Image: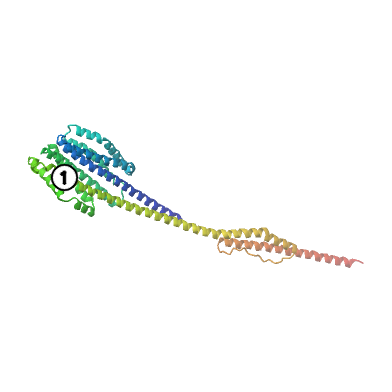
Amino acid sequence: MPTAVAVTLGGLRVASSISSAAEYQRVQDVAELIVGIGDFVHELQLERDLTARYVAMDRRGGTMLSLIREQQAAVDAAAQRVRSKAETAGDAFGDIGRADLVRLRGRLDELPALRGTILQSRLPALPAIDKYSLFAADALRLYDETVQGAVDEGVIAGLKSMASLARAEEEISKQRALLTAALVRDRFETAEIDAFTAARAREVSERNAFLAQATPAQRQLFSDTVTGQKVDRAEYLRALALSLTRDGLSLRRIEPGGQAVDTWFDAITETGDQMHKVNLALARSVISRSVEFQGADQRVAAVNVILVAAVLLVVLLITSVMARSVVRPLRRLRSEALEIAGHRLPDLVQRLRESDSAGSRQVQPIGVVSADEIGEVARAFDEVHREAVRLAGDEARLRGNINAMFVNLSRARRRWWSGRSP
């Protein structure tokens, strides 16, 4: 029973360690897929914002169209990496995550149609931005599914921080597209300013969520990375654009000479790029932590397997020794008992019968001297052997006495007949 309990507990620990290692492998696969999705969204955001600028320019400008085509190639390459990774990592998600992944793969196939619709139609900038945003939203939805089933608090915090930061980056990109389109026309449309302020509010909310979920080290990484003159310039231009719009003034006042579009696009792109860099660092941290814990669980499982095997081996050795200690005396008891029953006792009885005397009654005991039950059986058999010898001796003595009695009677009879003869 103790052995069964030990083996059962060891088996449960092995199963638990293997299950935990598999879970960390799942988290690693999901995080690696999310890295690919994050890269795809980052490239798609730039395509969207360049396209919004092109649309605001009334779809004129060969240089801008060339930039868009180059960016489309980068997006297609990132999309292909997502497809490839999804083939192997898709099963790491739950049911909802797999459904979201199927939806995203469908979106990837729809990209050519989306581009054709926007570039070849008269669709305004805001609806074009919204159509691209649907693709990004479906991709970002998968971030929320990464934490499903995760058990380590550090991993969960890292995944949640990645999700918040990715959504904040998306809102920054929307602001880039909206203000770029407005700067091209020197003014915001009413719907555009509403969308711009809403994107700004969501960005602040997601940043606060990130700061609340992130560890001190992650917050410090964000502060050290998302900083610099361009980041400050983007914040200044954004505030200035909102102020001018509230006052009903033209956005041309932001920077005389018509360079405000390039200045804003470059500055806010730096902010988004730095946030994406932080997100990649968070992903690497999650993957590294998952690999570390997976290795630890695998080592624990290996140690438990060794311990269980060692326990079984010790039990097997003890059982073997005990079996030998039982089998050897049993074999000797059996062989000597058969020898006594088949040869020694019959021979002794025969000799006693032939000698008409009791003879020697010494009985050689069975050579089993242990004090356990087998030894007791051997002693009992010795007693039976002695009793059989004693009975045989008594029988021989009785037979000798009877023979002697008949001899004496025969002699007395001869003497009696001799006395009566004339």
Q: Which residue is drawn at 81% across and 65% down?
A: 409
Is 410 in front, or is 252? 252
Is 80 in front, or is 91? 80
Q: Can residue 144 be seen in this view?
A: no
Tell whether 261 sits left or right of 306.
left
Which secondary structure, mark 1? helix
Is 10 in front, or is 118? 118
Quarter of the view holding residue 334: bottom right
- Judge the density around disc 1: few (<14), some (14-19), many (≥20) Cα neighbours within 10 Å: some
Q: Can residue 268 be seen in this view?
A: yes
Image position of 23 with respect to 418: above or below: above
What residue is disc 1 on?
266
Where is residue 385 drawn, in percent x and y?
65, 62
Where is residue 155 drawn, in percent x and y?
28, 50
Where is residue 359 drawn, in percent x and y?
71, 66
Is 220 in front, or is 154? 220
Q: Which amino acid does label 1 sit on?
A: Asp
Where is residue 140 drawn, in percent x and y?
25, 42
